[in-house]
Amino acid sequence: MKMKRILIVIGLFATSTWGQGASFRSAFPDFPPEPYGAAIGGAAVALTGTPSAPFWNPAGAAFMDGRAIMAGGSKFQNWPIYTANLIYTQGDQGFGAAALIINHLGLKAYDEQVKYQENSISYTWATKLSGSIGIGVKGKYIMASSDLQDVQASGLSIDAGVLFNLQGFANIGFTAKDILSTLKWKTGRVEHLPIVFEGGIGTAPLFQRLSLFVSFRGEQGMGISDIGVGTEAWIMPGRLSLRLGLDNRILNNMMSISGGLGLIIPLDIFSSYFINYSFEMGQNIVGVQHRFSIGLNWE
C-alpha cells in the first residue's frame, strides 16, 4: 500500500502535470517556504525584522539590519516530498539591501531515489524610499526535471513588492509574484504563469507581547483564492515566541491550521542565533507538514 501511494503521488506531480507540458503552482515553489510565515497561516506579506521576510515579500529586505544566514527544510507526513532552502540577507550598505535565496523541492520513489525535483535561485534588491516606505524586486530562475519521463523545464520570473510602515505600529505589504514569467520546455513549448497578488497587514508587538497578521491572496483572472490570519505571542520578549495561524483556501474549499515557535539566543561573537519550527495540518493529501530553520544574525 505504501509503495502504491508513493507511486501515485510521483505520477500526480510529474506525469500528470509536467509530463503534459502544463505547469503547476509549485513552479517557483509555492509550498510555504519557511516556518516563520507558515506558522502564522502564511499571512506574512507584511513581515519585517527577520531574514524570513524576503521569502514572502521582496520589500521586506528593505527593513533588515546587519547580515543574516538561514538554512531550513521540511517534511511531509504522508508523502515523500522534501524541501530545503538557504538564504543570505544583507541590510542596506548604501546601495540597497539584498537577499540571496536557494530553494529545492524533491519527490522520492519507493527506492528512496529522487524522481522529480525543482531547484530555484533568486536575488532580491530592496531599498527605502523614505523611513516608512520600502520597495523591493526579486529575480528568480527555476530548473525542473523528472526521471519518470524525459521532462525538463527552466524559466525566469520576477516578484515586486512594497511595504508601508505605519509609525512603528503596523506594516502594510503588497506584492505581485511571477511577473513576466516564462517556462521553456525541452519540447520547445513556452509557457507563462499567471501573476499572483498578495496583500496584508501585520502589527508590531502590542505591549511587546502580541502581533497580529492578516493577508489575502489572488491569482490573475481568478479573484481572491486564500485568506490567512495569524498571531505571534512573545512568552519572553525578544527571546521566545509562540505562533498560531489559519489558512482558508477559498477556491479549493480547504482549510488548515498551523502553529510553531521561535527562539532567539544572544551570542558573544555573533549578535544572535535563532531557531524556528512550524507544523501545518488540515484538509490536504500530504498530511501534517513540519518545517524548521536555524540561522545567525550579525552586524
Image: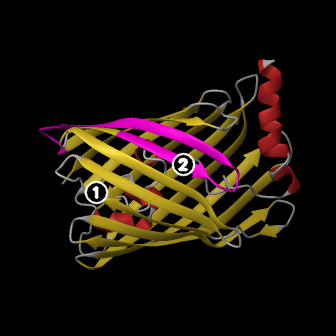
The magenta-colored residue range is 243-271
Q: Is residue 233 left or right of residue 31?
A: left
Q: Earlier in the sequence, mark 2 or mark 1?
A: 1
Residue 264 position by quadrant: top left
Q: Is residue 288 above or below residue 20?
A: above
User: Residue 251 in magenta?
Assistant: yes
Identify residue for label 1. Answer: 49
175 or 3: which is nearer to us?
A: 175
| Quadrant that contains the C terminus | bottom left
Comparing labels 2 and 1, the label whose residue is closer to the camera: 2
| Local secondary structure at mark 1 | loop
Between the residue at mark 2 and the residue at mark 1, the CA separation in whole angstroms equals 23 Å
User: Between 264 and 268, which is closer to the camera in this rendering?
Assistant: 264
Pick whichever, 205 or 109, lies toward us: 205
Mark seen at residue 247: 2
Few, some or many C-alpha atoms within 10 Å of disc 2 (few <14, some 14-19, many ≥20)?
A: many
| Farthest-out residue, bottom | 129
Look at label 1 and name its amino acid. Gly
Relative image position of residue 187 (x, y in whole percent): 87, 61
Residue 51, given in percent of the width and then of the height, sits at 34, 53
285 in magenta: no
Please give the count of numbered marks on the rendered protein: 2
Residue 95 in the image: above or below residue 244: below
- Quarter of the picture containing the N terminus is top right
Q: Indicate how the structure is coloured in the image.
A: secondary structure
Please name the residue shown 52% across and 62% down the image.
Answer: 216
- Residue lying furthest top in this view? 1
| Quarter of the view holding residue 72 | top left
The image position of residue 88, as x and y in percent, is 37, 53
Please tell me in which quadrant of the rendered image residue 120 appears: bottom right
Q: Taking the image as drawn, is residue 58 in sight? A: yes
Above or below, 263 relative to 211: above
